[in-house]
Amino acid sequence: MAGQDPTLSMNHPFYDVARHGILQVAGDDRQGRRIFTFSCCRLPPSHQLNHQRLLEYLKYTLDQHVENDYTIVYFHYGLSSQNKPSLGWLQNAYKEFDRKYKKNLKALYVVHPTNFIKALWNIFKPLISHKFGKKVTYCSTLRELQEHLQCDQLLIPPEVVRYDEKLQNLHKGQLPPPTKTPPPRPPLPTQQFGVSLQYLKDKNQGELIPPVLRWTVTYLREKGLRTEGLFRRSASAQTVRQVQRLYDQGKPVNFDDYGDMHVPAVILKTFLRELPQPLLTFQAYEQILGITSVESSLRVTHCRLILQSLPEHNYTVLRYLMGFLHEVSQESISNKMTSSNLACVFGLNLIWPSQGVASLSALVPLNLFTELLIEYYDKVFSTQEAPGEHTQNTVEVEQAGPVTRGFTQTGTPRASPYLPRLRVP
């Protein structure tokens, strides 16, 4: 992982924070003072990082050096609304770093400062001593930083270097060089969001249905099927991040504690949206876009053909999810969520292009395909043929009969009452 110390052990007391490489020890400055670098571009999204743990890790690391003079280089590039700590956290952090930390901090270099930093400085100015304020130096470029420190010894993230080059090129009137995506960070063993289905299967004793999906579906099936606007209404962003953080840390979540049925609904959608590859896979994207050109009476059959090309794991998870959404649609008199309404909500959470974002014109076929999966769940998923196998039977719509709806908590099929036959569009 870029930025991570290769010698970092998983037994480190703050491995969950240290693995991101946010704080690094980077040698000594020209006065022999130990240098620390803090890189905002290494901060993961807020729901993936416990900021209280981050504060404790910073103190833990600095405690080993603050008895001597030291320097901090703060790389501001990469701080965004997705990973930015709250103002309350910043204020608390300033209070936590008492005199023993501030006394021996001899220089703080803020690299690539923005108007946000300057505004933040004005907010905290009444709390910051004049003596401490004199230790702060703004550096608009790495070249300016080089005037104070030997940059070649600093662990400067590649993203920061590329951003600095972009600024210089813009200043010279040149086009910036193409950017490269940094390598992904290794997930925690308990990570639930932003990891592949295979990763979740490997970490959960071969369980095919991802834990977050199973937990949210089970809860909503028992308590939320008749909630008006289910999946359409939002929930508190702060609460959603908190629940994500708990799940990613392997801690239990009791949705009753939140008193809002839309929290588990939003968590389910977020889980799907943060999969590295969409549940319906990138490979199926173009096929799905063609659904509108298929004759209405053949569309369900066409859906089944597309699903036969899915990996078996994806197919199993999709069948589990669609069975549940079909149940939700059957309660539309109460929850107002018809298969069409659900499709508008879930379409882009199930499939998106490998490059860029889906165009407005793509929404019609994507939502139509999703609606067919929900509305005609019993027919689309009634085949006994394994995904990836194509026989003559795959183009025949099976006659109505006993179907499965949902799974047990072990991921095995669970029989459900007979569903009424639906007219194929």
Image: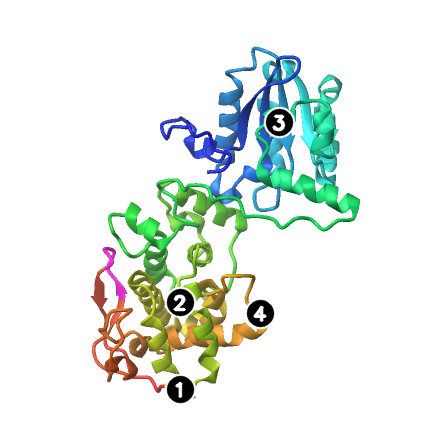
Q: Residue at point 39% right, 83% down?
A: 299
Q: Is residue 321 above or below residue 54?
A: below
Residue position marked by numbered label 2 in the rendering: 226
Q: Which residues are magenta?
A: 406-411
Name the image quarter holding residue 312.
bottom left
Residue position marked by numbered label 1 in the rendering: 425
Marks 1 and 2 sit apart, C-alpha to C-alpha, by: 27 Å
Mark 2, secondary structure of its residue: loop
Q: Out of 282 and 304, give the one closest to the viewer.
A: 282
Residue position marked by numbered label 3 in the rendering: 152
Q: Is residue 121 above or below residue 130?
A: below
First in residue order: circle 1 vs circle 3: 3
Mark on residue 359? 4
Marks 1 and 3 sit apart, C-alpha to C-alpha, by: 66 Å
User: Amino acid type of disc 1?
Assistant: Pro
Marks 4 and 3 sit apart, C-alpha to C-alpha, by: 44 Å
Marks 1 and 4 sit apart, C-alpha to C-alpha, by: 25 Å
First in residue order: circle 3 vs circle 2: 3
First in residue order: circle 1 vs circle 4: 4
Estimate how packed mark 2 is, as few (under 14), some (14 to 19) or many (20 or more) residues with alpha carbons within 10 Å. Answer: many
Estimate how packed mark 1 is, as few (under 14), some (14 to 19) or many (20 or more) residues with alpha carbons within 10 Å. Answer: few
